[in-house]
Amino acid sequence: MLKTVICDLLGITYPIIQGGMAWVATGELAAAVSAAGGLGIIGAGNAPPEVVRREIAKVRERTDRPFGVNIYYMSPYVEELIDLVCAEKVPVVTTGAGNPGKHLPKLKEAGVKVIPVVASVALAKRLERLGVDALVAEGMECGGHIGEIATMPLVPQIVDAVHIPVIAAGGIADGRGLAAALALGAAGVQMGTRFICAEECTVHPNYKNAVLKAGDRDAVVTGMPGHYVRVLKNKLTRQFEELAARGASWEEMDRLGAGKLRAAVEGDAEYGSLMAGQSAALVREIKPAAAIIEEVVAEAEEIISRLGKLVR
Ligand code: TUI
């Protein structure tokens, strides 16, 4: 059976973590992933603490297994969310779009395991020194806010640079991706896009159908240097292209993007921000989170045993 250090560290059965996608990863999805033996994560995004508290309660009503909350460091509620996860004794916190260094003492004191998402070697090394438990190395194939380095070169560089477990993310949606991540030295994977098409994911069916329909060139990059966002092509991305073509300011771009992720989650597939990674093209069906996890693990196990036989 496929087991890695991350399973022991987090008390989970399979080395699969569900990405903490803002507005997309609700308590329902996180609970389903955790109940199935992975690590489900609530995406706090820009939501206020009382909303996140309700999502935590949803998970606890549905499962006793470990779960996490992702704190997005551009949120206006970071301080309150740190207090909330400590008070609630949330087992795991992942972080995005910022450096959680100054909150580490408080989180560790409360017994919270901290797994920052990073997109560079420098930040990975800095956070290891500060005492984080593990890292997610996220390549620019992923959805939402992206870094500049692809998963294939990023993961082994971070694996070489630190001594703590590394979880690979970006472009991974099936057992082939999990086997490849393990080959790169990762101790597990984080998948976001694949779990948008979990039955338990509460986004509008229009969002799920856009992921199912996506082809290899549909997950495009919008925005400005330092703030690139990967989303599925639609009328909104064409508006972004027009703005970029006439040299629009960062403020104009920001204004166009405001509130559009929520619009997508509520069903606006034309003008909503359908955040998804390049792996969208690998997602072909909607099924329960447990079935996704079982399929990914079985496929990875089969590949690993087949690869072992190549060495004679
Ligand atoms: O966080 C992400 N991806 C996201 S967050 C998000 S939430 C949102 N977006 C738009 C509207 C409303 C809500 C959507 N997608 N990925 C994790 C990640 N973090 N990747 C890279 C980083 C990162 C980048 C820079 C981490 C730290 C950093 O710099 C830290 C520093 O200060 O050195």
Image (tube, grey):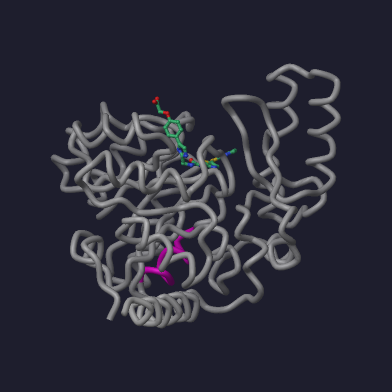
Please state which of residues 82 and 165 is positioned toward the viewer in this rendering.
165
Indicate left or right for 262 with 192 as reference. right
Q: Is residue 33 above or below residue 100?
A: below
Please state which of residues 187 and 39 is positioned toward the viewer in this rendering.
187
**Residue 33 drawn in magenta:** yes
The residue sitting at 39% across, 32% down in the picture is 78
Q: Is residue 120 above or below residue 261?
A: above
The image quadrant where one finds the N terminus is bottom left
Q: Dividing the picture into quarters, in which one does residue 178 lie?
A: bottom left
Q: Position of residue 81 (x, y in %)?
A: 36, 38
The residue sitting at 66% across, 54% down in the picture is 265
Q: Position of residue 68 (x, y in %)?
A: 34, 55
The residue sitting at 24% across, 66% down in the picture is 4
The residue sitting at 74% across, 53% down in the picture is 217
Q: Position of residue 234 (x, y in %)?
A: 81, 49
> What secondary structure is the stretch in magenta mostly built from?
helix
**Residue 235 drawn in magenta:** no
The magenta stretch spans which residues?
26-34
Indicate left or right for 136 with 254 as reference. left
Q: Dividing the picture into quarters, in which one does residue 252 lie?
A: top right
Single out the residue that lies furthest toward the left: 109
Indicate left or right for 3 with 184 as reference. left
Indicate left or right for 263 with 45 as reference. right
Q: Position of residue 245 (x, y in %)?
A: 84, 25
